[in-house]
Every structure is written in C-alpha cells, then in structure tokens.
Amino acid sequence: METNRLQKNITENVWLWLVKIIAGLGIVIFLTIHFIVNHLVAPEGLLSYADILRYYSNPIVPIMEAGFLIFAVVHSLLGLRSIILDLNPSTKVMRFVNPLLIAVGSASIIYGLWLLLVLVQRASL
Amino acid sequence: MNDTIWTIELKIFRQRADAQRYFQTFQIEINPDEYVLDAIEKVWAFHDRSLTFRHACHHSTCGACGMLVNGIEKLTCITSIRSVTQNNGKLLIEPLRNFPVLSDLVVDTSSMFKALEEIGFNQVASLPSACLPYERKTLEHERSEYQRLVDCIECGMCISACPVSLTDSNYLGPAVLAAAHDASSQPLSNKILEIVDSRDGLWRCHNAFECSAVCPSNVEPGLRIMKMRQTVIAHRIKKLFSRG
C-alpha cells in the first residue's frame, strides 16, 4: 500500500493530465481575449499606468486576468513536472519536488492575485 | 527499373554482445531504384558475411527490417536508395533506438511483443475496429461481419522514434498503447485500464507524434493514444459520478 502511494507521487495520472489540458485551453482563450482587448479594443493601447488603471476599472478585466494567471501557473508547473519526470527522478526526489511545485504555484497565484487586487483598488479610487 | 548504377558508401553500425561498438564503411555499386535492404544484403553477400540484420518478407508486411537510415526510422525494404542518398553519396545505417542491441543491426524487441500480448493485441480484427476513424469502411452487405488484418506490422519503429521511450525504458510505448486502443473498442476492460492508466502508460506521452510520422503502415499511434485518453477520461468521470 505504501509502495503504491509512493509510486503515485512520481507519475502522471488522468486527473493531472485533464487539469493541464483544461488550463492549456484556458490560456489559449484568455490570451486571445487579452491580445484583442489590449491591442484592438483599448483606445491607442495601454501605454501608461493611468491607462492600465482605467482598463482594470472594468470588472470583467480583473476576473479574466485572474483566470489567465491561474491557468498559466498551473499549466506551466504541471508541464515542468512532466519534464522532471522525464529525467527519471527517484521517489525521494519527487517527494520533495511535488510540495515544492505546489508551494511555488500557490505563492505565485497569491502574489499575482494580491497585485491584481491592488490595481483594482487603485482603479476604483 | 533503369540500368543506372550508383556508387554509394554505407557506414554501418557494428556491435557484438558486450564488445565495443563501432562503424564500418563499405563501398557498393547499386541501382538507385533498389532498396536500402538490398544494399545491406549486398554488403553481407559480397563484403562481410558476419554482418547481422533482420529481414523476411521484403514487401513491408513482416516489419522485421526497421532500421535507422541517416538517423531516421525507415522500413528498409521499401525505402529506395534514390530517396535517401545520391550517386557517390553516403548512407548511415544504425539499429532501432530504445531497444537493446543484440548484434549489429538486430535489436531485442521482445519487451514490445510481451506488452502487446498482455494487452490482448489481435492481428485480425473486425472491419470497423481495424480501421482508423477517418478511414472509409466499405461494407458491401451491412449485416456481414468482415474481418481484416490490422495495420500494425509490429516493426517497433514508433517506439524507436518516441522521445519518451528514450528517457523512460519502462514506458509502454506507442505500439502498445495503439494496440490497447484497438483492443478497447469494446467496453473498457479492467485489465486494459490497469495497464494503460498507469505510471508507464497513456499519460507519459508528450504528443510529439514522432510515432505517427515514422509509422510505415499509417497506424497513427499518436492519434490512437489521444483517442484512448478520451476513452479513459470519459470512463473515469463516469465512474466518479456513478459512485455518488
């Protein structure tokens, strides 16, 4: 039982793959919207800090950017994990890598969301 | 076939048991419309009888003569000299990758055959399950049950080209996963599920599609792996909701 549990730590599985694919699809959708809005919809582009704040005053924008942030972090870290697995790491290494990736991902998302909230707060002033 | 004769240089991988590996060069004269396997046979017949290589049918049915020709997986019995070199040109011949070398150009593919057997791979299948999704199925009488040989000739070239097989020798590989897709046309059995939805199964594939690119029979192992993933995901989701 213990061996099975440890084996699962160093492998890909159906759910991680599904999450990676959904996140990848999310990136394609949000990045497309992001590019269109930034370059075609925003008048003369977002060139100054004031432009950015005005952009973030639209409530849809921070929601979209938060989604983009989460999808990008999740997809990239799961991809990085796949690459690490290709290097045939030992169970011991993966027991260290898995929590590290979760910590890096969580910290990146929390920091990104905090920045997003700061921008939204300043935009509302 | 015309009467043109080319002079080409064959640089062939040599290795005996645990001895040091090296390359040996041979110059031969050959008609460019002949095949790479013919060139290797000429080397064996007229230059070095100790050269070992695998061959049988000479018409792309047995899958025995898969090798690396100039670094790319080719079925040498159907690869013309003209398509891979030129007059006074060179040819680099090596054994398939990702299999242990037994001798010279002969590799040990037994791991692939064992896995194929375990997965329940059948050489003959009903027409719908033997055809790819985009292939046209020609049924003369709808009620008739037609069978045909499946496309895979078990040459192992897909495993040789697979970048994941290169890094993980335990990975089942494209041939076996494609066979699992064939075998799973019926409701997904626990046995197949256990094999493919495992550490060395479906989820290790990086979608490089090198397997599909080198497959001489258009089996499309890459596409089949994707289809198999869809099947397993649908099965897992269904199972998840049926619990509650």
Image (cartoon, coloured by chain):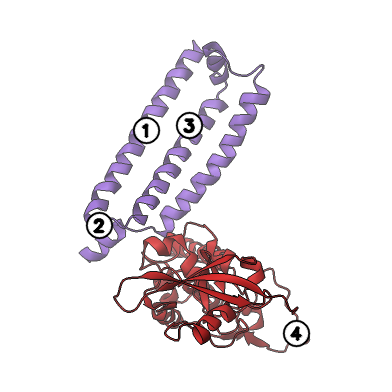
Chain colours: A purple, B red
Q: Quadrant of residue B136?
A: bottom right
- Residue at 52 percent across and 57 percent down: it is B208
x and y percentages locating residue B70 in the rendered image: 53, 64
Residue B150 visible here: yes
- Residue at 34 percent across and 51 percent down: it is A84
Q: Are marks 1 and 2 on the same chain?
A: yes
The N terminus of chain A sits in image quarter: bottom left
> Cβ–Cβ below 8 Å for labels 1 and 2?
no
- Numbered disc 2: secondary structure: loop
The reply, left or right, for residue B169 in relation to residue B227 is left
How far apart are the alpha carbons under marks 4 and 1? 59 Å
**Residue identified by numbered label 3:** A66
Identify the mark nearer the N-term, 1 or 2: 2
Q: B177 or A61, which is in the foreground?
A: B177
Q: Nearer the viewer, mark 4 or mark 1?
A: 1
- Numbered disc 3: secondary structure: helix
